[in-house]
Structure formats: structure tokens, C-alpha cells
Image: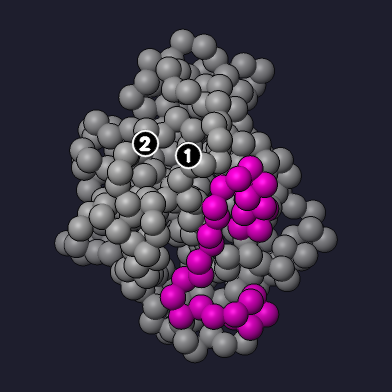
Amino acid sequence: MSLRATRDGAVPIYVGNENLNEPTQAGSVQALASREVIVEGAATRSPLMLIHGAWLSSRSWDTFAEYFRDRGYDVSAPEWPRKQGDVEELREATDAIAGLGLTEIVDHYEAQIRALEHEPILIGHSFGGLIVELLLDRGLARGGVAMSPAPPKGILVLPFSSLKVASSALAHPSRWHGVVPLTLDEFTYGFVNTFTHEEAKAAYEKYYVPETGQIFYEAGFANFHLHPPTELHFAYEERAPLLIIGADQDHTVPASVSKKQFKKYEKSPAQTDYLEFAGRPHLMMTAEKWAEIAGAIEGWIAGVPEKPGVAAGKASA
């Protein structure tokens, strides 16, 4: 692993398996040493699959989906299984998601990937970031980006802010296998703490949906089980390239937790990179300067090696 210092007070950019000599600003991947980051024609691009996080729907990807489609990418943002309809419908029909666990969700996305003609690049946020890591662990996808990913098994200590957000689910045993709602105040603290009150209220009304408690139970008690659904094989040599992104104002998955995940991969020869952005909350895809993050991801994607002749359905058959 290498740590590159940055100019002008920008947060550090950590890059794995690279020898880096020049400083760079967060939000820019001129960056990744010998990699080519000039984006070529759309015909050579892998499809992108965006995977949303907990207490959200695919609507949370609207900004990123438009950004990448405008640049010629084939973008999909499938909902989690058992989630049907728009945000307003999901708030009303909550019974269907009770008991929905992580394995069922990951299996659902594996089926989506195998139905594609070409291996995709996966981009996931929060629990969606962990889902990306689990899919790469299964040998699926050409590469993956995990934005503030939920912690897998092996992250033993969490900051107070993470525990405060998780308490909405874990402090109420009746919700462990049921459905977990969030109030406006809880959503503001966990997702949009850098927003004004008016902006936070608008984001809550636009993006929030109740969530299955099962995933929080599985993640919260993962370290007490031998093989929980959140288990990753950090030393897996054949894993596709992975970029982990941290946000320094994130209360739900603080940057310190994202860095811990990055460091868990240090024994693997597989490409693992880390970028951290200053001033961003958990819901960074809708926050100010979200396009800087999208641009950094686009540059990183351009440096992911091709896998000639490998279709998605053949990736790990």
C-alpha cells in the first residue's frame, strides 16, 4: 500500500499496490500513477451497475446515473429484491421486506450480473458497497467501487456515530427480523448531516424508505458467528480491482471505518485503492460537489484492466 500526501489541505488519498510520487487533490485521479485515465470511446466501456444502500432506493443514484449515461455508459440501478415501486410506494408496502437478508440480496444481484452480456463495473453505496465487495468475492464483475461501505466481519470497533445510527435497528430486538423506520432527525444525523434543515427535509422526503432489520442484525452480530453473510476473503488473489471511497463527514460509515476496510485487503495482491473526500456526508451522491466524486470514479474505471472475451455469465461459472 502507498499513502500519498496531498496539497492545499486536501484529505489524503490512499492508493494500494502503486508507487506514487506526485501529490494530488481529492476528487481527482490524474492520479493513479502509471494507469491511463483518459476515457476512450463508449464502445469499449463496461456496463455500470449501481447498488443502493439501506434506507434508500435506486432513486438515490439519479445524479450518478445521469452523469454516466451522459458519458456513454450503459447504466442500470436495480432495486433490492422484494422492493417494488417508487419511494412513495415503498413507504407504504413495508411487509414484503421483513426478514430480507444479505444473502438473498447478493444472490439477487448475482442473477442480474449473470444476465448481462459483458462483465459490469459495480458501484455501491453503504450496504450497497458491502454488496459490491461480496460480489467481487464471488468472482463477479470487472471491478467495483464501494462508497462508504457497511463494515464486513472483522471490523471490531466502530465509532460512536456509527453505533448511534445502527441503534435505530439494533436497540430494538423486535426490529431485528422486522422493518426499521427512521425519523427525519435520525436520517439527518446519519445521511445528510452537512445539509441545512430545509435541504435535509427535502432529501428525507425524496430518498428515505423503511428498511429490513435483518441486514442490521446480520452485520451487527457478524463477529459472533463463524461464517456470517458479511464475511469476506480479504486475501483473495483473483479478486477484481476495488476502489473504496471514504467521506470525512460521514456519521454512518466514518472515513476511519472505510480506511480499516482498505487496510484489511493489504495482504492481497489484487488491486485495492482508497480515496477520501472532504466535507461529504454519508449520502454523498446527492451532496454538494457530488460530480467531483463521480469524476474520480470515472477516472479510476478507465484504469481498470480489461478481461478480453469474458462475458458476465461466464465470470465464475
| Quadrant (top left, top right, bottom left, bottom right) of the N terminus | top left
Q: In the displayed structure, does residue 250 sit left or right of residue 137? A: right
Residue that lies at the very extreme toward the left in this rendered image: 226
Q: Dot 2: few (<14), some (14–19), or many (≥20) neighbours within 10 Å?
A: some
Residue that lies at the very extreme toward the top in this rendered image: 21
The quadrant in which residue 201 appears is bottom right
Disc 2 is placed on an element classified as: loop
Q: Which residue is drawn at 37% across and 33% down?
A: 305
Q: In the displayed structure, does residue 154 sit left or right of residue 142? A: left
**In the rendered structure, which segment of residues is drawn in magenta?**
61-90
Task: Where is residue 246? Give x, y as percent.
Answer: 51, 41
Disc 1 is placed on an element classified as: helix
Task: Where is residue 227? Give x, y as percent.
Answer: 19, 62
| Quadrant (top left, top right, bottom left, bottom right) of the C terminus | bottom left
Where does label 1 land, which residue?
44
Would residue 103 be visible to someone looking at this image? Answer: yes
Q: Type of residue at label 1?
A: Thr
Magenta-drawn stretch contains 89: yes
Tell me if residue 107 comes above or below residue 40 in the rendering. below
Where does label 2 land, which residue?
306
Magenta-drawn stretch contains 48: no
Q: Which residue is drawn at 44% across and 75% down?
A: 81
Q: Type of residue at label 2?
A: Glu
The quadrant in which residue 58 appears is bottom right
Task: Where is residue 168? Give x, y as percent.
Answer: 52, 70
Q: Residue at x 39, y 56 (%)?
A: 117
Front residue of this view, candidates 311 and 58: 311
Front residue of this view, candidates 198 and 127: 127
The quadrant in which residue 247 appears is top right
Task: Where is residue 4? Give x, y as percent.
Answer: 47, 19
